[in-house]
Amino acid sequence: MTDFAATRALFDLPPGVAYLDGNSLGPLPRAAVARMERRMREEWGGMLIGGWNKAGWMAQPRSLGDRIGRLIGAEPGHVVLGDTLSIKVFQALAACLAMRPDRRVVLSDLGNFPSDLYMAEGLAGMLGRGHALRTPEPEAVEAAIGEDVAVLMLTEVDYRTGRRHDMARLTRKAHEAGALVVWDLAHSAGALPVDVAGGGADFAVGCTYKFLNGGPGAPAFIYVAPRHADGAVPALSGWLGHRAPFAFEPSYRPGEGIERMRVGTPPVLAMAALEAAMDVWDGVDMEDLRRESLRLGDRFIAGVERACPELVLATPREHERRGSQVSFRHPEGYAVMQALIARGVVGDFRAPDILRFGITPLYVGEAEIDRAVEALAEVMAERLWDRAEYRKRAAVT
Amino acid sequence: MTDFAATRALFDLPPGVAYLDGNSLGPLPRAAVARMERRMREEWGGMLIGGWNKAGWMAQPRSLGDRIGRLIGAEPGHVVLGDTLSIKVFQALAACLAMRPDRRVVLSDLGNFPSDLYMAEGLAGMLGRGHALRTPEPEAVEAAIGEDVAVLMLTEVDYRTGRRHDMARLTRKAHEAGALVVWDLAHSAGALPVDVAGGGADFAVGCTYKFLNGGPGAPAFIYVAPRHADGAVPALSGWLGHRAPFAFEPSYRPGEGIERMRVGTPPVLAMAALEAAMDVWDGVDMEDLRRESLRLGDRFIAGVERACPELVLATPREHERRGSQVSFRHPEGYAVMQALIARGVVGDFRAPDILRFGITPLYVGEAEIDRAVEALAEVMAERLWDRAEYRKRAAVT
């Protein structure tokens, strides 16, 4: 059994705060500061350019990729770290469109994170071959899978509602229609057990700063199914994805398998923090995590529904249809969240009316859940959200 | 006058090492470790998600962009930080090709860094509209500028030879032919005075881990000339380049000016190290730096040519035709460099036969130059490069 009191002790959380926003930015793993200092002083400072070999910086996008791969059910050697999630989405999409040259539809859904949709739009615009991006409501995606779909691109867990798609089922449907599938695991990796290999995903992408706790702006990752690894065309053909980067050949030759999804110089400093974050996962069983996440989520839902009848649950009640976040709707959601944060309970707000609460058993337990319910009850009962101070919008919401 | 003894004291260099490889990876600025610790403990750890507003993380790609902009002669507000140099090259090229839809040639040169050429190849392949990448010898570029050229993409200072292109002249020629110009400043930013505005560059890109000392894998930057800022089409249309990122609209609308060149979440931890690195530049006058760089470069060339007749100068002798690196050729260059590094003089090697020495007055003075000459003389006189231990190739060269 995973010892969640032990994992909690591995994080440096500010006193007095119930942090329910790990679905947006995970907290600081205690070991990360020392790890970073070592990387900076001993490796960068002490080894200088020699760090690439002596400290193994060049290999870390692959080794960290494999550590993430274990959490998402990837075959070893098929995940690599780098860039941002938007860039990884672009790479996966571009590779898929190249494999389905006669099809013109990118199918996603309105619940997908906007950047995924924007990247698809940008790609389609650049290609200029009439690709269309279709975004039905999430519930209507399955029915929209047709023979014209080149690629189905979905985020498994909806960033606003926490609604979870059925990866295996939708992937199977898409494959039956001859389409490829890209899964965005931004709200899945480290949130629940994922099985990209078993689910048949062609590509999967994700970020490491949410449930994986890699730090603000931590790098993204990409998975390419073994059957595509040596066939995928890298549209962003950077030197570190070249078969022989240090031969400095004049023409591009794609690297073996997942190597070709590397682009530029790896983010060496950011990887030090991520390494410390991934150490926490070594002691975690994903089934235990899921059980605890659902238990705490149920407790939160029950508490809020009892204490705050004005809040409307936006997350599906059924376990198999949700991720590891619970969302409620309220027309004054922004101000409600500000009032809550002022009371030391940190969730976040997503337009137009969603209050999000990340359920992260690594460092959140019953005490935080109960405190969040109490604070929310107080905010609603006393209409604290109606105060001017909570209605003033910050730049980044 | 810039006080180079004072700037030198701002770096943490290993004792006994003459570091002449700042053209590949700059050394650790002393203040960077404390700055990073503050970012991790006080900002990430203490503010959690609130760091985006309270610590100003979201604005830093622009503020750091402007600090770099000062060193490259950019108009304020027209440089933004993010991603890797290869990604920034892709953005600039894609935007240029969209502005010259009737032309099919990307003109570069054989001396360009391979990743720039690879990104152009990948882009051309993806577009599938018959774009050709032409790469004459650097000296033949000017004559190759014709009416079919959509974009001239050059690295100002050659990564192997240190040969410098005439930015203003080539840009003018290209503009006369109706082409756009992208300048890669990887070996220019922080190496010599650059004037992208005065030189007429349409786009410029660069990295921050070489002469700017931002740390291994530090983010890249992109400059877009004001005349293109609101017209450039962002092919990599990520959410942070959207006009209203936090409105989470379903369709992409490009942000104002340089904002549209942002893609995904900024590299917050890496930016902390870069901030400390940029502080060093506050006290530096680029003309002083250039004078000192050329003086030290001349001293190095004279010393090596006197002591090591087997080494052939690969860098132009004329001041206006070189950057801030001096290179020599030797058929056993790899082993020569390993023998040199074993003696505490760190330069690097680039296939097939180039020994590179970065001249970086911020932390390199006459003592290091003289020591490098002496060590090189010893390696050559005693044929130390012929030892087996120096011939064994490392993974990253």
Image (tube, coloured by chain):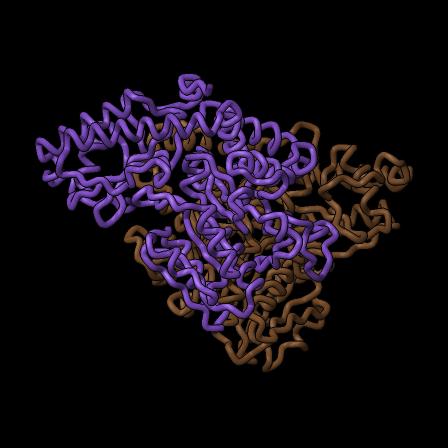
Chain colours: A brown, B purple
The one nearer the camera, B132 or A384, is B132
Q: Is residue B328 above or below residue A290?
A: above
Count of labels shown?
0
The one nearer the camera, A162 or A274, is A274
The quadrant where residue B306 appears: top left
- In the figure, is residue B91 to the left or right of A240? right
Q: Position of residue A39 (x, y in %)?
A: 41, 33
Q: Residue at x 34, y 35 (%)?
A: B319
Q: Position of residue A48 (x, y in %)?
A: 35, 32
- In the figure, is residue B106 to the left or right of A113? left
Q: Residue at x 49, y 29 (%)?
A: B277
The quadrant where residue A164 appears: bottom right
- In the figure, is residue B126 to the left or right of A162? left
The one nearer the camera, B125 or A394, is B125
Q: Position of residue A283 (x, y in %)?
A: 48, 43
Q: Residue at x 40, y 33 (%)?
A: B26
User: Quick one: quadrant of the C terminus of chain B?
Assistant: top left
Q: Position of residue A55 (x, y in %)?
A: 34, 37
Q: Is residue B158 above or below residue A321?
A: above
Q: Is residue A383 above or below residue A198?
A: above
Viewer can see residue B290: yes
Q: Residue at x 46, y 19 (%)?
A: B1
Viewer can see residue A75: no
Residue most toward the left?
B382
Q: Is residue B250 above or below residue B71?
A: below
